[in-house]
Amino acid sequence: MSEVTQGPRSSVFTTMRFSKERGLFLIEHHIARMIEHATQLRIDATAISMDSIVQLLRQNPPEMVEGLLRIEYTHSLQLRISYRPFSVQNEQVDAVTLPSPIWPARIAGTKHGAWDAYIQARQHAEQKGADLALMVHEYSIVDGDRCSPLILDEDGVIWVSDSNTSVDSITFKAIHDWLLDAGFHIQHGRLNERLVARCVEAVAVGSGVGVLKIDSIDGEPIGDGSSRLFDCCNSCLERLYNGSENWDKVWS
């Protein structure tokens, strides 16, 4: 199934981790975001539910043991699913920047049907020998092609984009309080050139990638070589993955 559709209000989607043995990771959070975004896109969200998704998944079980599950809900009230393996996961990566697509306020920040710009951004990064595309608007990073960038400054503050173009990250929300407990401060604002150029560390988090440590952007080294934030995010995610309460069984 193609991940590219005609217009933003044609569908809403989400992507999550799955394990054939353990089930779906943080599925309730993904369903809640899908319903919220569907409502914003004026898509009737009535059929977006745990029961309807589980029924479809049991009828179409994955062949792989674990990977990523994409759930799409169309404007014509159809649920669609597709499975794919992990690609880059919990690694050090290089990134490139690309202009962010700009949508009207009711579209911006949603996981909508016209996602082709992000798919093309990822493909562009791969063609350039990079692993990640960072989307830029008005000289500030607003999102990643499939994950959310976090910038750590010299004062121990983690900066998160406050742009309405940015998609709220389920992974970041899940580890938010643990990052605070670890001694970091969290601030929403503009991830502009000055902040990024002077940062101590840059990472990106997301369901599809776990946590990535960004070592360079457009060929320029980023950070001071430390990995405190990367290591902490990794530790937080491991705790989440190991918690049985964060998984909902489907196939066993």
Image: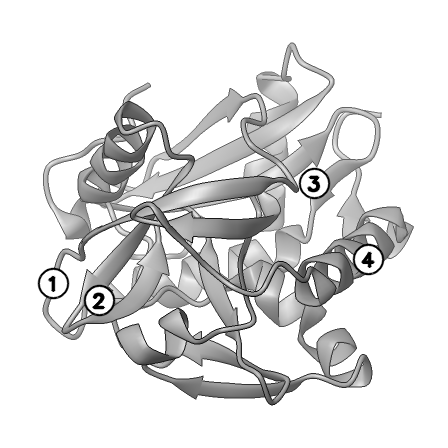
Q: Is residue 220 above or below residue 20?
A: below
Q: Label 1 neighbourhood size at 10 Å, few (<14), some (14-19), many (20+)?
A: few
Q: Which residue is mark 1?
A: 102
- At label 3, which amino acid type do we have? Leu
The disc, 2 or 3, on the residue closer to the chain's N-terminal end is: 3
Indicate which disc residue 108 carries. 2
Position of residue 61 measured from the top left corner of the image (x, y, whole percent): 64, 17
Q: Label 3 neighbourhood size at 10 Å, few (<14), some (14-19), many (20+)?
A: many
Q: Of the residues tagged 2 and 1, which is closer to the observer?
A: 1
Position of residue 209 measured from the top left corner of the image (x, y, whole percent): 57, 42
Q: Of the residues tagged 4 and 1, which is closer to the observer?
A: 4
Q: Which element type, helix, strand or loop, lies under badge 1? A: loop
- Out of 108 and 200, give the one closest to the viewer: 200
Write the residue at 64% across / 84% down: 156
Position of residue 195 measured from the top left corner of the image (x, y, whole percent): 38, 79
Q: Are marks 2 and 3 in contact (CB under 8 Å)?
A: no
Q: Are marks 2 and 1 in contact (CB under 8 Å)?
A: yes
Is 45 left or right of 51, judged from the image as shown? left
